[in-house]
Amino acid sequence: MQNKAKGKGGKRRKRKTGRKYVYRRLTLLAIFLLMLGGGIYGLVRLGMAGVNAIQSRIEAANAPEPTPTPIPTATPIPVLDDSIVIEKNMESINAAGFTTSLMVNREEVSSFQRSTPILFGDAAEYAASVAGITTFGGNNWRNTFTYGQQAVNEGRLTRDWEINLGSLETPENGTWTGTGWTGQPLVIQWDETVLPTLGVYDVYKATEGFTEVIYPAMDGKIYFMELTTGSETRAPIDLGQVVKGTAMLDPRGYPVLYIGQGIPTPTETIQTMGAWIRAISLIDNTEIWSLGGRDPFSPRLWQAFDASPLLDAATDTLLMLGENGVLYTCKLNTSYDPVAGTLTLNPDQPEKYTYDGNNYGESDSRRWWGMEDSLTIWRNYGFFADNGGYLQCVDLNTLELLYVTDLTDNHDATLVLEEAPEDGTVYLYSANTAEKQTVVEGVGTAHHRKINALTGEIVWEQTYTVAQGGGSVATPHVGEGDLKDLVIFACSDTQVNVNGNAQYGGLLIARRKDTGEAVWQVEQTAGYWSSPVVIYDQNDKGYILQCDRNGILHMYEGLTGAEVCNVDLGSRVESTPVVYNNILVVGTRGQYGRGETQKIISVSIR
C-alpha cells in the first residue's frame, strides 16, 4: 500500500516537475530573445545615430555660410560740416557805411590774428562740466534758461521762499530797486572738489549737493542763497554800483564771478563817467580784477555793461559787449588750485573792436553805438545787434567784420541761434523795438525776424504796431520737443485788443519757424520785459513761464497758448527767471502790481 501510494505520489510529482522545467526554459528563452532583440535594436539605433551624425557633419561642412542677421542702426543725426565758413560780404558793409577799428596791446592796429584760435562747441558743450545756469540764456547760443528735469503734474505754481532787497540812490539817475532787465539769476551746484574752497558759511561746505543761487541786484549788492530753502549762504557783497544785467560764472566751475556795471559811476561830467566789468573771487568774496572805466577807445560817451559775458574755456578768453560800442576779448590766465584753495587772474591787455557807420552819433535823431544784448557765438563767429539797429558778424579770431544787416531800429533782445543741418545752415532769431527810425508821432513798427547766420540774409520778418519804445526787449525762445516748429516772442507796449478795447499792452506770440506766421497769441494789458522761459516735461511737452510787468507769473501750454495757471509775485517783474529742476527763481522791482516790496522769490512748479 505504501508503495502504491508512494508510486502514485511519485508519478504526479514527476509530471509537475517537468512542466516547471519547460516553463522555465521558455521563460529564459523569451528573456534572452528580448534582450537579444533589445541589444540589436540598440545597436541599430546607435549605428543610425552615428550615420546621422556623420551625415549631419557632412551636410554642415557642405552647407553655405549663413547670412548674419543685420543689427539695426540708429538713424544718424545730421550735423553741419566742419568746413563751413562765413565769407566776408563787403557789399553789405559798404552799404551801411561801416568802418571798424582795433586795439591790441593798447595800440590801434589794422589787423589781428589770435595766436590760439577760439572755437566754441554747440550749446550743450558750453557748461557741460557744471550743473547749473552760468550765463544769460545758459550758453553761447543763448537758448535756454533751465537746467535739469522738469515735470508738470498738477498744473500749479506755488510761492515758496523769498528775501527782501534794498535800493540804491544815484545822484544822476535816481533810485534803483530790486532786480531789473535782464536781471537773470545764476544757479550752480558746486562740485565737491570746489566746495571746501568756497567763501560760504561752514555748514554749506559740508552739504552734499550744495546748490547756490547768485543774484546781483540794482541796490548794488550781490546776494547768495541756498536753492531749496533761500537761506543765506554768505553775506551779500556790496559793490555800491547798479547791476541791471546778468552776471556770468566761469563755465568750468571755477569759483569766480564776472559782473557788469549797468549805470556809470557818477562824475562831474559825462565825459569822465566810467563803468566796469568786475571779477569777484568766490573764495574770499573780493574783487580781484576789473576792466573798463571811461574807455577813450569807445565812440560813445555813455559807458555801461548790461550784457552777460561768455568765456572760452579752451583759450581762457573772456568775451564781452559794452553799451559803449566796444567788443572786448581778454585772455585771463586763470590759475585755480582747489587743493590749496587759491584763485588768481593775470589777464593780458584786452583786444578791442569798435565800429562806425552811416548816421551814427550821440543825438536822439541818429543811430546810437552800443550793445545791450549779449554776444551770441557759433564756432569762432560772434553775432550781436546794436542800439543803432545793425546786426554784425565778427570773426573772433581776427576781429574782422564779415557782414552787416540792417534791422532798422534799436535792438536790446539777445539773438538766439539754431543749427539747421537739414538746410545746411545756421539761423538767428531777432526781435527789436521802435525807438527812432520807425517812429512817427509816437507810433512805430517793430519786427520779429529769422536770419541766415552764414550770410546775414533775412529769411522772414513779421511787423507789428507799437508805441514809441515798444516791441521786444525779451529774448525769444526757439522751440524744441513738441514746440520744435515754433518760436516764442514776448512784447511790450504793443497794439493789442483786450476785452474789446484797443490799447498798448503785452503780446505773447508763437510764430512758425518756417514762415513767421502767428500760430497763437495772448494779448493783455501788462507788457513783458522778461524773456519767455520754456520747460519741457518727460514727454517733451513744452510749457511757457512768462512774467509780466504787473508782477504775474503765467504758465501757458506751448502748443496752444492756453493759460494753465498763474501766481502773483507782488510787484513788477522785468528780470528773466531761471528754472533748476522744478524750482523757479526771479527778482521783482517793488513797484506797481500789488505793491509788495522788492524781493527775490522762489516758485515751485507742480
Image (cartoon, helix red, strand yellow):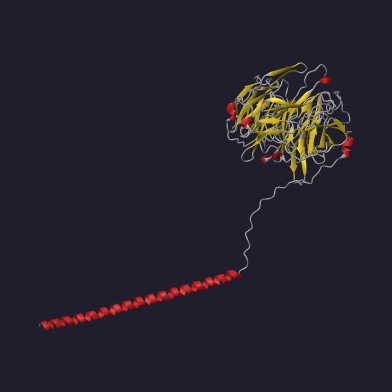
Q: Is residue 557 left or right of residue 267?
A: left
Residue that protrudes farthest toward the left in the picture = 1
Residue 100 visible in the displayed image: no
Q: Name which quarter of the figure residue 94 lies in.
A: top right
Residue that protrudes farthest toward the front in the picture = 340
Quadrant of the snapshot with the N terminus: bottom left
Foreground: 399 or 366? 399
Q: Is residue 446 left or right of residue 65?
A: right
Query: Does 360 sit above or below residue 120?
Result: above
User: Horizontal and vertical percent for residue 477?
Assistant: 71, 35
Q: Residue at x 18, y 82 (%)?
A: 11
Residue 485 visible in the displayed image: yes
Foreground: 303 or 67? 303
Q: Name which quarter of the figure residue 249 lies in.
A: top right
Q: Is residue 133 left or right of residue 5?
A: right
User: Horizontal and vertical percent for residue 518?
Assistant: 74, 36
Query: Does 234 sit above or below residue 33?
Result: above
User: Horizontal and vertical percent for residue 365?
Assistant: 86, 24
Task: Give the number of callouts.
Answer: 0
Q: Is residue 256 left or right of residue 115?
A: left
Query: Does 21 sit above or below residue 522?
Result: below
Quadrant of the snapshot with the C terminus: top right
Query: Does 274 sit above or below residue 555?
Result: above
User: Horizontal and vertical percent for residue 26?
Assistant: 31, 79
Q: Residue at x 62, y 68 (%)?
A: 64
